[in-house]
Amino acid sequence: MHTEEFKVNAEDLIKKVKDLIAEGNARKIIIKREDGQTFIEFPLTIGAVGAIIAPALAAVGAIAALVTNCTIVVERRD
């Protein structure tokens, strides 16, 4: 497993998270504030993706309203 980080602004946050989920090889997504503090962390297991996506995207939308810039950390399967 390896991780990647993406710095995004609030306007691009939801689109980037949706794109990462659509890629299908992410195991976990973590969204951090500019100071490095974690806002939200959610797993993306194959069986739970459908149940987790809607509430997670709602939370991401709320976070986007609170921040100007953030970092998305993605744990991927090798």
Image (cartoon, rainbow, N blue to C red):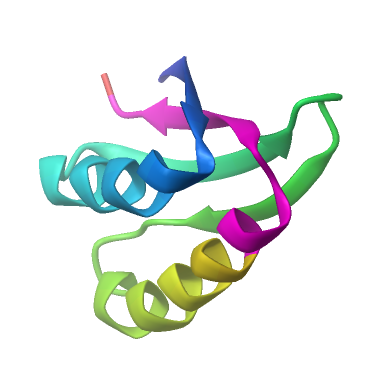
Residue 32 position within the rendered picture, expressed as x and y whole percent measured from the top left: 70, 36
Residue 27 position within the rendered picture, expressed as x and y whole percent measured from the top left: 39, 43
Q: Is residue 44 left or right of residue 3?
A: left
Frontmost residue, 66 versus 56: 66
Residue 71 position within the rendered picture, expressed as x and y whole percent measured from the top left: 59, 27
Vertical side of 70 occupied by 31: above or below: below
State the image quarter where residue 16 is shown: top left
Q: Is residue 20 left or right of residue 56?
A: left
Vertical side of 75 occupied by 43: above or below: below
Q: Is residue 29 magenta?
A: no
Vertical side of 47 occupied by 2: above or below: above
- Name the residue at 63% across, 32% down: 70
How many labels were placed on the picture? Answer: 0
Q: Where is the N terminus found, in terms of image quarters?
A: top left
In the orientation shown, which residue stands out farthest toward the left?
Answer: 23
Residue 5 position within the rendered picture, expressed as x and y whole percent measured from the top left: 49, 17
Q: Where is the C terminus found, in terms of image quarters?
A: top left
Q: Is residue 30 left or right of residue 19?
A: right
Q: Is residue 69 magenta?
A: yes
Bounds of the magenta span? 63-77
- Name the residue at 61% across, 70% down: 62
- Name the residue at 26% across, 41% down: 20
